[in-house]
Amino acid sequence: MIETPSLVDQYCHGVLRTELGLGTFEAHLSRTEGPPAPGTTLFDTQTGFAVRRWCPPLLGLEPHCSPARYLARRRELGVLESGRRLLRGSGITTYLVDTGLPGDLTEPRELASAGAAEAHEIVRLELLAEQVADTSGTVESFLANLAESVHAAAANAVAFTSVAGVRHGLALAPEPPGPGEVRGAVGRWLAGRGVGGELSDPVLLRHLLWSAVASGLPLQLHAGLGAPGLRIDRTDPVLLTDFVRATAGLGTDLVLLHGYPYHRHAAHLAGVFPHVYADCGAALVRTGARAATVLAEILELAPFGKILFSSGAQGLPELHVVAARLFREALGRVLGTWVAEGAWSLTDAQRVAGMLASGNARRVYGLD
C-alpha cells in the first residue's frame, strides 16, 4: 500500500462562489470552444467519468450516479457546504493559488478555510503588467511601476507564473530584450491597448520572464493543452530549451506546468537541466482512467525529485478531488506494480511517493 497522507497542490485556482446548473457546470468541466455533440454531454469524457466516480460519495451519494442526481444533491447542500465537503475530502493540505483569472473565484484564504488547509499565492506576470499599465500614463512610469510591482509581489508570493505560451507561444527569443527594445514595445502596447487590453507582445513577455528570473522565485511556465482555441503546437515545452539554457545557474527554478500531451518532453527537460521541474497533475485529470499510464511515462524520464503534483483546478472543487484521487490511484498502481515485481523496494516506493506528493513542492517553493 503506497500512502500519500499529505498533498501539496502546487498549481490551482480558486473555486466558484455561485450555484451552477448543468450547462454552467459542464462548461467548467471541460474547456471546449463550443457545446458538446448533439445528444451528448461533457460528462462523457475521462474527466467527467472521474468526477462521477470520486465526488458523489463525498456528498452522500453512490459512485457513478447520474449527472442530474449529482448536481441536484450539490444544489441541495448549497455551494458553500458542497465545496467544503469536496475540498476537505480531497486530502490536499496546501494550495498554491494562481489568482490571475477573472470571475467570482475564491481567494487563497477562502480556499484554505473551506479546505481546512494552507494556501499561498502565485502571481501571474501578465495580469500584473496589465494592472500596472492601467495606472501608468507613460513608458517610463510603466517600467518603474512594473519593477516595483514585481519586487513587491516577490516579497509575498511563493512563485510567479506566466502564460506566455498561451498569449504568444513558447518559441520566444531566449535572451533578455535590450532596454531600447523594451521601451519601444511598451510604447506601442500602451498606445494601442486601451484599458484592459491583454499583453501578447513577445518582447514584453520576455521582459516579464526575465524580471521574474531576477526575483529568484520559482517561475511556472504553462505548456501543453490549455485554453480553448490554443494552438498547442506553440506550447510544446521543448520550444523553451534555449531559454532554459540561458537561465541555468542563475538560482531560479523553472516549473513546466501541465505539459500534456508533451509530458515526456517536459520530463526530458527536467531530467537534463538541474533547475527544471515537471508538473504531473493536470495531465492525470484529463486522462482519467488512463492516468497511471501517463504518470508512468513521466517517471520514465524525469528524476523523482523533479516531479510535482498539482490539480490545475479552476472553478470546480470537484477538479481538486479528481486530481488528488487520480494521482493517488495512479501512483499506487504504478509504484505498487514495481514493488510487486521486485523492481523497487516498498521503502523506496513510499519515499518517492512522498516526494511527488508534497516533498518536492515544499523544497522548491520553500514551504517549510
Image (cartoon, rainbow, N blue to C red):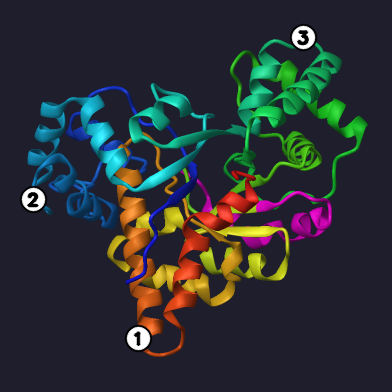
Q: Residues within 10 Å of mark 1 (few under 14, many from 20)?
A: few
**Is 143 displayed left or right of 112 in the figure?**
right
Label 3: which secondary element: loop
For badge 1, the amino acid type reads Ala
Is 234 inside the magenta-drawn segment? yes
Residue 89 seen in this snapshot: yes
The residue beneath circle 2 is 62
N-terminal of the pair, mark 3 or mark 1, is 3
Residue situated in front as seen by the camera: 16 or 337: 337
Q: Determine crowd level at label 3: few under 14, some 14-19, many 20+ residues with C-alpha closer than 10 A.
A: few
* Amino acid beneath label 2: Glu
- Where residue 234 appears, x then y in whole percent? 60, 53
- Residue 261 spot, x, y in % from top left: 48, 62
Q: Residue at image x 86%, y 26%?
A: 183
| Residue that mark 3 sits on | 137
Quadrant where the C terminus is found in the figure: top right
Nearer the observer: mark 3 or 1; the answer is 1
Q: CA distance from mark 1 to mark 2?
A: 31 Å
Q: Position of residue 223 (x, y in %)?
A: 56, 52
Q: Amino acid at mark 3?
A: Gly
The range drawn in magenta is 229-254
Using the image, determine if residue 219 lies above or below residue 351: above
Residue pointed to by mark 1? 340
Q: CA distance from mark 2 to mark 3?
A: 58 Å
